[in-house]
Amino acid sequence: MSEITNLDEIPRHTPSNPYNFTEEQIARRNREVKAAIKDFPNIPQFYIEHAWSLIETKKQEELDEMLKAKPKERIIGKGGMTIEEGN
């Protein structure tokens, strides 16, 4: 016969929280990301979550600098070496 397992003993999945958001921030993120997905259905959820996390964790000055920064250009040099130019 098989052994009966108590469901409380089974470990549950804990989602990744690299920014150490509070439970309130996570609940707000889930709500706001869900609303953004409805407004922007062609953008993958991962990108929306990432943008939300950036806005939540960065100061306004840092966000402004990110928007002003020149995009990096990748140049393939001799031997396939990649050289990045820009900020």
Image (cartoon, rainbow, N blue to C red):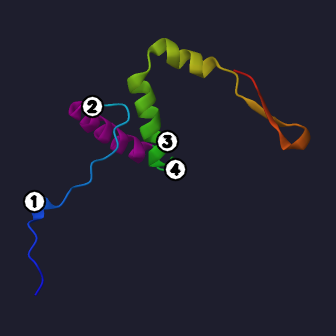
Q: CA distance from mark 3 to mark 2?
A: 18 Å
On the image, the x and y values in percent for residue 10 come to 17, 61
* Contact between labelled residues 4 and 2, with CB atoms less than 8 Å apart: no
Q: Which residue is mark 1?
A: 8
**Magenta stretch encompasses residue 27:** yes
Could you tell me which secondary element the residue under label 3 belongs to? helix
Quarter occupied by residue 80: top right
Please tell me which of labels 4 and 3 falls first in the chain.
4
Quarter occupied by residue 5: bottom left
Q: CA distance from mark 3 to mark 1?
A: 35 Å
Relative side of 67 to 54, left or right = right
Q: Which residue is mark 3?
A: 47
**Magenta stretch encompasses residue 30:** yes
Compared with 70, 22 (above or below) is below
Relative side of 39 to 82, left or right = left
Q: Which residue is mark 2?
A: 25
Q: Nearer the viewer, mark 4 or mark 3?
A: 3
Please tell me which of labels 2 and 1 falls first in the chain.
1
Q: Which residue is mark 4?
A: 42
Q: CA distance from mark 4 to mark 1?
A: 39 Å
Q: Name the quadrant of the N terminus.
A: bottom left
